[in-house]
Image: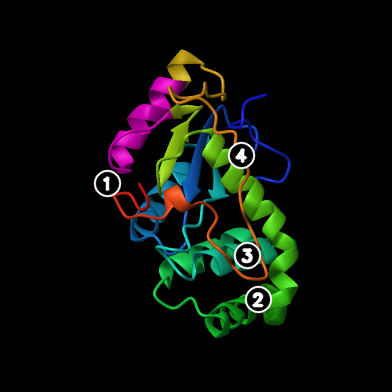
Amino acid sequence: MSVQDVQADDHVLGDPDAPVTVLEYGDYECPYCAAAAPVLRRLVAEADGAVRLVFRNYPLPDVHPHALTAALAAEAAAAQGAFWEMHELLFDRQDRLSDADLRAYGEELGLAGDRLVGEAAQPFGDKVEADFAAGLAAEVPGTPTIFVNGVLFSGRPELAALQRAVAAAGRSGGDAGLEPGPGGQRSRRIRFRRAQREPLAEEAQQQGAQDRCGQ
């Protein structure tokens, strides 16, 4: 099984049985992820059931100090049945991601806001850590990183380019797996102390390539 195969606890937008899977590794405080979010939603909406979007957490807390707590809040919102609603709010308001803001967003969505932050949100760190580990195994260079049926999408996440990649994936009928990159799968463990909100991985913290955070 590839790390890019859709898992039971993945968040899926669109038809769960869609033939093409667009998988994004993202950070809620990354401006390029925020720019990509409405494009990816439109991609799914205009695909007539042919595309499903999967989002996995890849927070870079040394670059973005609120990214980890925002990811925990999104997962906590998922437990209350509102992942995608919270996902959209976080990107729309990514300049306001304090604990008070996250609590207020939850209440705006009719959720128990106190369950989205602080110690109540810490159990959802296991899901965030698992997402991040899958990203490391897939050699994710930064955020956003997008795969279309397991193939790394290069270039800016613009609608026309993504639609061409989806069409190509549909024609090829390729599987949703991904072979490890030339560096192979990283073997080290992730240091992830949720209570202290420490960085997930040192090498992923520096700002870098154009249109991507963390490379």
Q: Nearer the viewer, mark 2 or mark 4?
A: 2
Q: Which residue is mark 4?
A: 15
* Label 4: element kind: loop
Which is nearer the eye, 22 or 160?
22
Identify which residue is drawn at 56% across, 25% down.
176
**What's the distance in space between the residues labelled 4 and 1, CA to CA?**
33 Å
Q: Could you classify mark 2 by the number of other residues whose Cα lies within 10 Å: few (under 14), some (14-19), or many (20 or more)?
A: many
Q: Nearer the viewer, residue 31 or 50?
A: 31
Q: Label 1 is placed on what type of residue?
A: Ala
Residue 57, position as x, y percentages in the image: 55, 52
Pointer 3: residues within 10 angstroms few (<14), some, or many (20+)? many
In the rendered structure, the answer to whether residue 12 lies left or right of residue 64 reads right
Residue at the spot of label 2: 117
Q: Nearer the viewer, residue 48 or 203?
A: 203
Per the image, the residue denoted by label 1 is 209
In this view, the mark in front (3 or 4)? 3
Please, what is the three-letter code of the amino acid marked with disc 2?
Val
Which residue shows up at 44% across the image and 16% down it?
171
Question: Compared with residue 157, is residue 182 higher up or lower down, i.e. above or below?
Answer: above
Label 3 secondary element: helix
Q: Which mark is residue 72?
A: 3
Secondary element at image label 2? loop
Q: Which of disc 4 and disc 3 is earlier in sequence? A: 4
Residue 111 visible here: no
Q: Give the residue type at disc 4.
A: Asp
Highlighted range, magenta: 152-169
Magenta stretch: residue 82 in it?
A: no
Q: Earlier in the sequence, mark 1 or mark 3?
A: 3
